[in-house]
Amino acid sequence: MPAKTSTKSPSNASERKPLPVKRERFIEGFVASGNATKAARDAGYRSPNVEGARLLANASIRERVEARRRELIRAAEVDTQEIIGTLVSQMRADITDLLDEDGEIDFVAARAANVSHLIKEYTVKRTASEAGESVTRTVKLHDSQVAAKALCEVFGLRQEPRPNRETEASKRRETEESVERVRAAHGDRAAEEYRQMLLDDEVTGKYAN
């Protein structure tokens, strides 16, 4: 009796084929910063503004990004609703929510109202003078615009710049110039080997043909 062959596919598409090291670094960087250009630069790509956008356009990369985010959320033992709720409260933060009737920070009331987490920084500065000691208290809330941007990222409302025709043409010129520099320094054979290396790369290959 012939052996049965299982056709069951892995539950996670990323398990079918390991990603190159650069792509893994890009995913980690993008999850950490939310900035595709920065993530591509830190991962070692030569044209991060173009390649970051191209990588995000790849469905398998986006899937890995979301999977990694879910892993981090589980590791932190928080759920999506808690994260969104925190960001929403930071975006809508109002300093008056923390003040008493005399305009002073009321930490007890802030904790009771569950708004003390809106405070990013609290400093007390004491200054001595001939008139005596003065005390200055400074309260800094979380940036509402930063929270709004983070929410856009959570809901997929943020769009990274996409390469246009001018960028594509510029990248082709840069690639060809790099090949010619190798040719001038090391000869035709080295230049063609370098070009082939570029062609073999999924990202740079389209610019080296």
Image (spheres, rainbow, N blue to C red):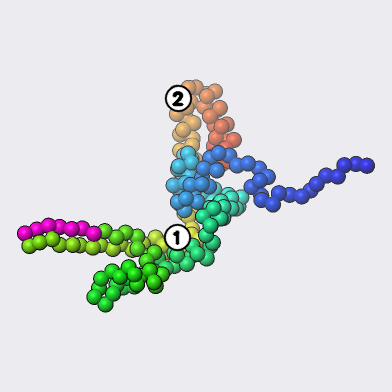
Decide which of tag 1 and tag 2 comes sooner along the chain: 1
Say what secondary structure mark 2 lies in.
Answer: helix
Q: Could you tell me residue 184's position as x and y percent?
A: 45, 24
- Segment colored magenta: 124-130
The answer to if 126 sits in the magenta stretch is yes
| Magenta span: chief secondary structure | strand
Relative placement, left or right, of 78 versus 139 is: right
Which residue is farthest front?
108
Please give the name of the residue rendered at 15% of the width and 57% of the height, measured from the top-left corner. Answer: 127
Circle nearer the viewer, 1 or 2:
1
Q: Could you tell me residue 175's position as x and y percent?
A: 48, 37
Q: Could you tell me residue 73's position as x and y percent?
A: 53, 56
Q: Could you tell me residue 128's position as x and y percent?
A: 12, 57
Please give the name of the residue rendered at 55% of the width and 39% of the height, measured from the top-left corner. Answer: 21
How packed mark 1 is, by other alpha carbons closer than 10 Å (few <14, some 14-19, many 20 or more), is many
Residue hosting label 1:
150
Identify whether 36 is placed above or below 18: below
What is the number of the mark on residue 184? 2
Dividing the image into 4 quarters, which one contains the N terminus?
top right
Q: Nearer the viewer, residue 204 or 124?
A: 124
Q: Nearer the viewer, residue 60 or 128?
A: 128
- The amino acid beneath tag 1 is Ala
How packed mark 2 is, by other alpha carbons closer than 10 Å (few <14, some 14-19, many 20 or more), is few
- The amino acid beneath tag 2 is Ala
The answer to if 145 sits in the magenta stretch is no
Please give the name of the residue rendered at 56% of the width and 55% of the height, measured from the top-left corner. Answer: 74
